[in-house]
Amino acid sequence: MRVLILGSGVIGTTVAYYLARAGHEVEVIERQPGPALETSYANAGEISPGYSSPWAGPGVPLKAIQWLLMQHSPLVIKPMLDPAMWRWSLFMLRNCTEARYRINKGRMVRLAEYSRDCLKALRADIGIEYDAREQGTLQLFRTQKQLDATAKDIEILKEYGVPYQLLDRSGYLQYEPLRAARPRRAGARRAGARRGQGHAGGRAAPARRRDRRLLQVHESPG
Ligand SMILES: Cc1cc2nc3c(=O)[nH]c(=O)nc-3n(C[C@H](O)[C@H](O)[C@H](O)COP(=O)(O)OP(=O)(O)OC[C@H]3O[C@@H](n4cnc5c(N)ncnc54)[C@H](O)[C@@H]3O)c2cc1C
């Protein structure tokens, strides 16, 4: 079959590769001067299947209203009289329940784990070399409430066999021993940008919260 692919980001390129390998005649069209110069160029480079989560989740409708009122909102909806847009919004709202979130996250994690395995096979296949590190991902929570809110996500990780560990402060320092050696103030100043939760390398937990539990999700290497 002759296949035309529009866009040579990570998706277009890998789809082209697998189709060509399956014997199809593939052509990729790209508007940029080279491949992967848009979103696939400047992402965080993290392969973390366990973090795959649907946007539609409990609490999101309320957050979405708040986002819409923000100057630099993570969500932009241009008011449109487009029936398809309103239908999509209704479907999205219907999926914001606990039960639907659980089903959808489970599906996403399964798919993401499968994709991670395909990526490993692809790397072995083409022998691509890059600065890959396989050390898992550390996620820090500033408040107990935030950590408690991950309980449902953790259940899903358990259900699908994604390895993870819950760490307290000393457990955390096993993985980040340099944090113990640094003066606390300096550590706290090495600020991560995001409030609430961050990956390793983000802001150290304030001293008064140091005994709070932290969550580490160890993904199988990606
Ligand atoms: C800030 C940020 C951080 C991220 N971090 C991560 C991460 O850590 N881990 C992770 O897994 N994902 C991450 N993502 C998501 C990930 O980067 C994207 O899901 C992925 O790059 C999307 O790939 P794509 O091929 O679909 O799109 P793109 O990489 O955007 O490719 C689309 C291509 O299509 C071309 N194109 C579009 N329209 C036309 C046209 N009409 N004619 C010709 N060519 C066209 C574009 O030029 C572009 O090259 C991040 C995303 C962002 C924005």
Image: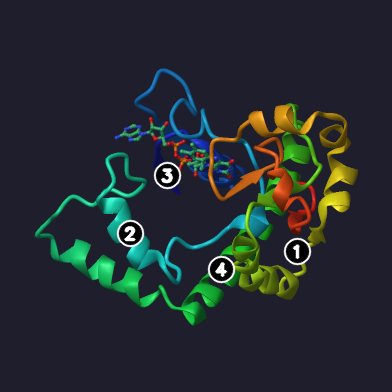
Return the disc, 1 or 3, that comes first in the chain's sequence.
3
Query: Does residue 15 sit above or below 13 in this rendering?
Result: below
Amino acid carrying mark 1 in the image:
Val
Q: Secondary structure at mark 3?
A: strand
Tell me residue 126's x, y (percent): 73, 34
Amino acid carrying mark 3 in the image:
Arg
Query: Which residue is denoted by mark 1 in the rendering?
Result: 162
Return the disc, 4 or 3, that comes first in the chain's sequence.
3
Q: How is the image coloured?
A: rainbow
Give the Cα separation between the discs numbered 3 and 2: 42 Å
Viewer-side label of 2, 1: 2
Using the image, tell me which numbered label, if any, was put on residue 105: 4
Give the Cα separation between the discs numbered 4 and 2: 19 Å
Query: Does residue 149 sit above or below 48 in this rendering?
Result: below
- In this view, which residue lies farthest toward the bottom? 99
Return the disc, 3 or 2, that comes first in the chain's sequence.
3
Tell me residue 191's x, y (percent): 61, 32
User: Can I make out residue 116 in this image?
Assistant: yes
Query: Which residue is denoted by mark 3 in the rendering?
Result: 2
In the depicted view, which residue is nearer to us: 122 or 81? 81
Return the disc, 2 or 1, that comes first in the chain's sequence.
2
Is residue 218 shown left or right of residue 75? Answer: right
Q: Secondary structure at mark 1?
A: loop
